[in-house]
Amino acid sequence: MIDRREVPVDVPPEVAFAPIRDIGGSNGWYAYDALWRLRGAIDLLLGGVGMRRGRRENGDLRVGDMLDCWRVEAIEDGRRLRLVAEMKLPGRGWLEFVVEPRGGGSIIRQTALFEPAGLRGLAYWYLLYPFHALVFRGMIRAIAAIGSSRAPRFPS
């Protein structure tokens, strides 16, 4: 199951990638943090890791790092971050961000992938899809807005 979203921004890839590099921990997930905290609380009740693990605070992410209820599976600074879910799920999940140059700016692509385990996994995906759509749509919009606001401003 795939939920893919993309948004163009008028900044170079390294600027557009900055809020992605900084996601999680005390920075939150940029949209609907209350829903993220609720999901983390449910995960704790189910015996999972919840959202309590935080992240490395210096902004530097490395493969294997914890990032709240995720683990960094791949990172190419300025270009790509792929997270694997460590929360209790009826299947396996990933969240990936890719930033590519496009024209004079960049395109930010966000992809949530879910590999359901049987009927429980399919039911999970379809029942929670409206919430995932809301959260992921808000997240990519916020990432684009934050990245655009970090662009250097020059007096005209």
Image (cartoon, rainbow, N blue to C red):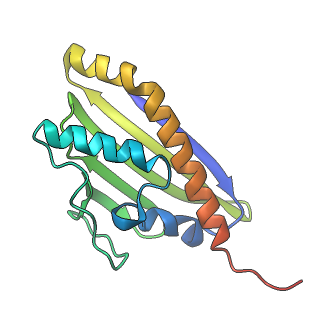
Spot the residue most to the right.
Answer: 156
Spot the residue most to the left.
Answer: 47
Residue located 58% across and 71% down the image: 15
Q: State the image quarter where residue 52 is shown.
A: bottom left
Q: State the image quarter where residue 119 is shown.
A: top left
Task: Tell me: 12 left or right of 61.
Answer: right
User: Measured from the top left, where is residue 115 in percent x and y?
Assistant: 28, 30
Asked whether 80 or 47 is in front, the reply is: 47
Asked whether 99 or 93 is in front, the reply is: 93
Residue located 15% across and 38% down the image: 45
Q: State the image quarter where residue 11 is shown.
A: bottom right
User: Quadrant of the image for the C terminus?
Assistant: bottom right
Spot the residue most to the top.
Answer: 119
Residue located 55% across and 45% down the image: 138
User: Measured from the top left, where is residue 38 in percent x and y?
Assistant: 32, 41
* 99 w.r.t. 50: above or below: below
Residue located 45% across and 53% down the image: 97
* 7 w.r.t. 13: above or below: above
**Number of marks in the rendered image:** 0
Task: Tell me: 72 left or right of 126.
Answer: left
Spot the residue most to the bottom.
Answer: 155
Task: Tell me: 22 left or right of 66.
Answer: right
User: Measured from the top left, where is residue 134 in percent x and y?
Assistant: 52, 35
User: Measured from the top left, where is residue 154 in percent x and y?
Assistant: 79, 84
User: Quadrant of the image for the N terminus?
Assistant: top left
